[in-house]
């Protein structure tokens, strides 16, 4: 059997970004995706925020990829005419005792070179008259974009450049057969195989299982659910950009995020789970209401309703400190991308560049 240059596992933002670049460089590229269309995983269940990169410690891959991804994705959205609202975001300190955390973020922003302005209540009122807080950070390079159009366009670009996208193709594992990898795939027709010189495992929530089944020791997965509530339009009309509290240990805090269609979500929270279950009920409605009412006092309990959820492929377990993205060539030509949680959507074009740099060493 012939060996193709590259098999990418997963047609999410990361896999498709890699496929687009690889095909553009003339590599014979196959994308294997278990779902029947692209972007059915984590890439379609998130806040749709173009992050600035201010949260992550200097020198980490998350920091570098978010900052570079913000720049690359911003240009791509513009070139491709994808709907976006890039008018910054606010991170608010509601009480005096949150000011230390806010100023720590400001110092981190300065260290990593991301613009963030400290605003006082008068300046905040000018931007967002219905938001209440003692101080805020305004981050101009953040915004929201249409992730559905982004994924559709990436898939279209990759195909136009020559990549082959195979849906309904679930990868079980890969076995080394020098100088290639034999990849075992389940399709409607049964088990199939494809040989590839290089493999990029960008399977999101499925990436750890594929890596482990292929004999690699990668960090374990701790799926972490993030639930969202929707906000009634009459109140949603009162904000014009994402409004975040100061971040928590496992997530960025329950924020208010308008999408490009003008609908506003509250969320996500952080809940470690054992299974992939996207249901959301009203049992946490009071918590969402209380969290957001602190900085958005016009909110009433009846204004919000359970909406959707996403699941973060975390490698930061409960009680763990910060964990970086895991992007490594664990076997000859086999790259695993593990723990690609937020800001993975923003980082996706930069991760693709990073992966291509690793692959180019092999292709010369
Ligand atoms: C609640 C939440 C909020 C977020 N908010 C933001 C945000 O505002 N901004 C931001 O930048 N990031 C955000 N993120 C992170 C971002 O969504 C992800 O990091 C990013 O979408 C990951 O893309 P991916 O391509 O790695 O994974 P995915 O989109 O999950 O793609 C992986 C693909 O692999 C497929 N797959 C899995 N297993 C197999 C297999 N065995 N064989 C074949 N295919 C397989 C899946 O079906 C899927 O399509 C958020 C994440 C969550 C959960």
Image (cartoon, rainbow, N blue to C red):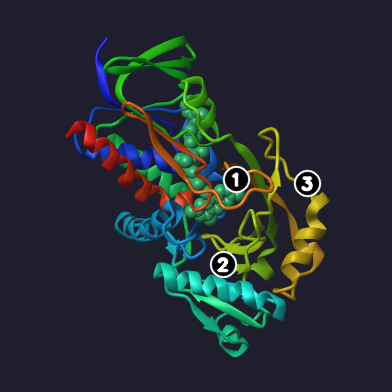
Residue in the picture at 46% in, 10% down = 191
Q: Earlier in the sequence, mark 1 or mark 3?
A: 3
Counting from the top left corner in percent of width and height, residue 58 is at 44, 61
Category of crowding for the residue at label 1, using alpha-carbon neighbours closer than 10 angstroms: few (below 14), some (14–19), many (at least 20): many
Q: Residue 242 got which mark?
A: 2
Q: Residue 281 got which mark?
A: 3
**Quarter location, residue 13:** top left
Counting from the top left corner in percent of width and height, residue 249 is at 65, 57
Q: Earlier in the sequence, mark 3 or mark 2?
A: 2
Quadrant of image for the C terminus: top left
Counting from the top left corner in percent of width and height, residue 17 is at 35, 43
The answer to whether residue 247 is above or below residue 12 is: below
Q: Nearer the viewer, residue 310 or 237?
A: 310
Check contact, mark 1 vs mark 3: CB within 8 A.
Answer: no
Check contact, mark 3 vs mark 2: CB within 8 A.
Answer: no
The answer to whether residue 251 is above or below residue 6 is: below
For the residues labelled 1 and 3, the Cα–Cα distance comes to: 26 Å
Residue in the picture at 61% in, 60% down = 252
For the residues labelled 2 and 1, the Cα–Cα distance comes to: 25 Å
Residue in the picture at 24% in, 32% down = 162
Counting from the top left corner in percent of width and height, residue 359 is at 27, 35
The residue where tag 1 is placed is: 316
Image side of residue 252 versus residue 287, left or right: left
Circle 1 SS class: loop
Circle 3 SS class: loop
Residue 54 visible in the displayed image: yes
């Amino acid at each position: 059997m012939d060996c193709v240059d590259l098999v990418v596992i997963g047609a999410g933002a990361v896999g498709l970004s890699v496929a687009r670049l690889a095909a553009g460089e003339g590599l014979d590229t196959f994308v294997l995706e278990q779902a029947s269309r692209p972007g059915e995983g984590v890439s379609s269940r998130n806040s749709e925020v173009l992050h600035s990169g201010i949260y992550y410690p200097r020198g980490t891959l998350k920091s570098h990829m978010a900052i570079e991804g913000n720049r690359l994705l911003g240009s791509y959205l513009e070139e491709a005419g994808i709907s976006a609202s890039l008018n910054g975001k606010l991170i608010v300190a509601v009480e005096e005792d949150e000011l230390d955390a806010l100023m720590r973020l400001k110092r981190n922003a300065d260290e990593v070179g991301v613009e963030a302005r400290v605003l006082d209540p008068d300046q905040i009122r000018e931007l967002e008259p219905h938001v209440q807080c003692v101080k805020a950070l305004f981050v101009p390079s953040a915004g929201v974009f249409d992730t559905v159009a982004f994924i559709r366009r990436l898939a279209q670009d990759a195909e136009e450049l020559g990549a082959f996208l195979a849906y309904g193709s679930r990868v079980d594992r890969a076995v080394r057969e020098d100088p290639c990898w034999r990849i075992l795939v389940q399709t409607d027709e049964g088990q199939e195989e494809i040989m590839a010189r290089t493999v990029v495992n960008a399977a999101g929530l499925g990436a750890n299982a594929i890596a482990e089944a292929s004999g690699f020791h990668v960090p374990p997965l701790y799926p972490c659910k993030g639930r969202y509530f929707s906000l009634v339009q009459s109140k949603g009309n009162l904000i014009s950009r994402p409004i975040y509290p100061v971040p928590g240990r496992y997530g960025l805090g329950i924020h208010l995020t308008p999408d490009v269609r003008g609908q506003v979500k509250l969320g996500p929270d952080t809940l470690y789970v054992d299974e992939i279950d996207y249901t959301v009920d009203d049992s946490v409605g009071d918590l969402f209401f209380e969290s957001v009412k602190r900085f958005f006092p016009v909110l009433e309990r009846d204004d919000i309703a359970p909406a959707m959820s996403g699941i973060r492929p975390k490698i930061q377990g409960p009680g763990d400190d910060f964990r970086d993205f895991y992007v490594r060539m664990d076997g000859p030509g086999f790259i695993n991308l593990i723990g690609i949680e937020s800001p993975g959507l923003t980082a996706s074009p930069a991760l693709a560049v990073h992966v291509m740099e690793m692959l180019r060493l092999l292709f010369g």
